[in-house]
Amino acid sequence: MITESSSYMGLDTNLINQLRFEPLSDEQINAILINEFGPFLTSTGYPHLDAQAKTAYSDFATDRFRRANQELKLTILRSFRVLLRELDNISNLVTTTVPYFIIQASGLNEEGKVVDDFEVVMEGCRCLVNGLKQSEDIRRVFISDDCLFVSHLAERIITTSLQIFNPKVEQPIFVNHNLQKIIELLYLDLRIAFAITALCQEARSRITQQINFFIGVIHKFAAQVSIPNSDNPMKLECINETLKILFNAFYSQTPVESSTARLCAQECAQLVKSPFIPDNVKHDAVNVLSHIISQIHVLCPPVDEDQVTNDMVVYEGYDVTFVKCLLDLLEKKLDELSQADLELLIIYFGILTLLSKDNKAVRRYCRQRILPPLRANDVERPPEEGNAFRNKMIRVMTKSVGNVKRLVADFLFILCKRSVNRMIKYCGFGHSAGLLADYGFLGRVSEGRRASDSEDSETEDYKQVEGSVNPVTGYVQQERRNPFDYMTEEQKEYEAMKLANTMDKLLDSGVFLPGRIGPDGKPQAVSHVNELVKDVHIESDHSDTD
């Protein structure tokens, strides 16, 4: 028998059965459950219950919940939220009744159900978020009956949003019209929508039917957060979750009308341009844009002089405000991200490359920002060193591999107007060789410079040091002592033989292969090093005839 003086040893099947069958008050049970689950409410951990104990606890908790007071109801829901973090034996925890119990607690079991207890409903929503992420059984129930509960969710999101954006018209589902609580409930509903659309195609298709409304939610909240208010942090969270839902919706196989995609692209661009939106929200807006590439071109429209506003950046007759803000965001990300996180930048380079290809004014503006005319002091150090935008971009090329490296190189090559000489001038041949090899442009390295290669790419003081720039490294290297100057002929011959032997070993082991530039401009392996010199014409120092 459990008494107040009992020594608590943790939840097991025996204790759970005692909780279930002994005449304990709500307060007593609440104290025991808080002792068990309380320490995990502010962390990401969870208590370890065996499979049998989890099933026993589910049966007890779902039954007791129906007649519990508010405090115990909240504790029971919090206990499920904690237990749902653990995947081991989750099917034992999620018994047949648990999905319906959680959905009912979150107020989504009926269409237009009255929210009479905000605290219980919101705790039920938090529990449902974890459940949808972790349990296939809960997801299956949530999308059952032709996504009935998803429809209830979408309807409540619409009703809640209407109440927030027009508080004077009271929506009947709310007994208490506490605006702060209603905004928090909307945030939790959006988290539920994000979780289910991320994991279920059926839910994505259903939510996509309301996509215009979700775009409108972003528009309304973005306008509201420009005015200082204590609710703004939660409204920004709502924008963030809505963007994630839109990301899932556009990822869906369900086709979206081009007019809707264009509207979404414009709203995302407004977020990127807004000074009131934090960078993490802007990043999610850029993520959405990566799924509606077909509408990117509308973000830099041509403008007449009478259309120009004070907050607009105009370049060669085009509104490039979005590009300016995207470059600002990218540069900040380049400073903040670790090497492991560089993959997150793929979407930035992809969007900027497409815009630069599509719009000459955008390309020139980006070149002005990233590859301004070189000065003498720009080539005093390797191109990957320094704090200029160019240096940061080239640093990404040297640190990353795969898609990021290629996209950065592609973007810079576009800014160089696909000029091999200009690319080498700004980046150095060592950093450009991989890209040029992929494109089959290595054969152009020795071609003469085009007249446009110097246009807008160098200053007068750079021209004075241009001849001293090492084209391989991309900067002026300090003169170093020739190591052969102080060697005897025998020492030189010894070092040469050692180098030849080392290269021979590397060739034999396949570490590298001899190669040449093929007719397609790409590296081409040769079977023997002698092939490299078979076509070389050697002129004799001695003539047969005087």
Image (spheres, helix red, strand yellow):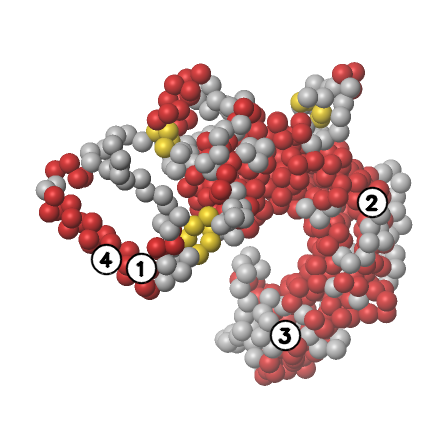
Q: Is residue 396 above or below residue 21?
A: above
Looking at marks 1 and 2 on the same chain, the residue that comes earlier in the sequence is marked by 2
Looking at the picture, how far across and down is residue 307, in whole percent? 78, 19
Q: Amino acid at mark 3?
A: Ile
**Residue holding disc 3:** 90
Residue 447 at x, y = what percent? Answer: 48, 34
Dot 2 falls on a residue whose secondary structure is helix
Q: Is residue 258 visible?
A: yes
Check disc 1 and report the residue beneath it: 506
| Among the 4 quarters of the image, the one containing residue 218 | top right
The residues bearing labels 1 and 3 have C-alpha atoms spaced at a distance of 55 Å
Q: Is residue 12 left or right of residue 200?
A: left
Q: Nearer the viewer, mark 1 or mark 3?
A: 1
Comes first in the chain, label 3 or label 4:
3
C-alpha separation, residue under disc 4 versus residue under disc 2: 64 Å
The residue closer to the viewer here, 422 or 221, is: 422
Is residue 543 shown left or right of residue 195? left
Picture residue at 43% right of the left edge, 50% below the top: 516
Q: Secondary structure at mark 4?
A: helix
Report the mark closest to the observer, 3 or 2. 2
User: Residue at point 64% right, 82% down?
Assistant: 17
Mark 4 is surrounded, within 10 Å at the Cα level, by few (under 14), some (14 to 19) or many (20 or more) other residues, namely few
Looking at the picture, tell me which residue is in the foreground, 149 or 468.
468
Q: Which residue is mark 4?
A: 501
- Mark 3 to mark 2 CA distance (whole Å): 42 Å
Q: Amino acid at mark 2?
A: Ser
| Mark number displayed over residue 258 | 2
Q: Quadrant of residue 527?
A: bottom left
State which tag comes first along the sequence, 4 or 2. 2
Q: Is residue 189 left or right of residue 34?
A: right
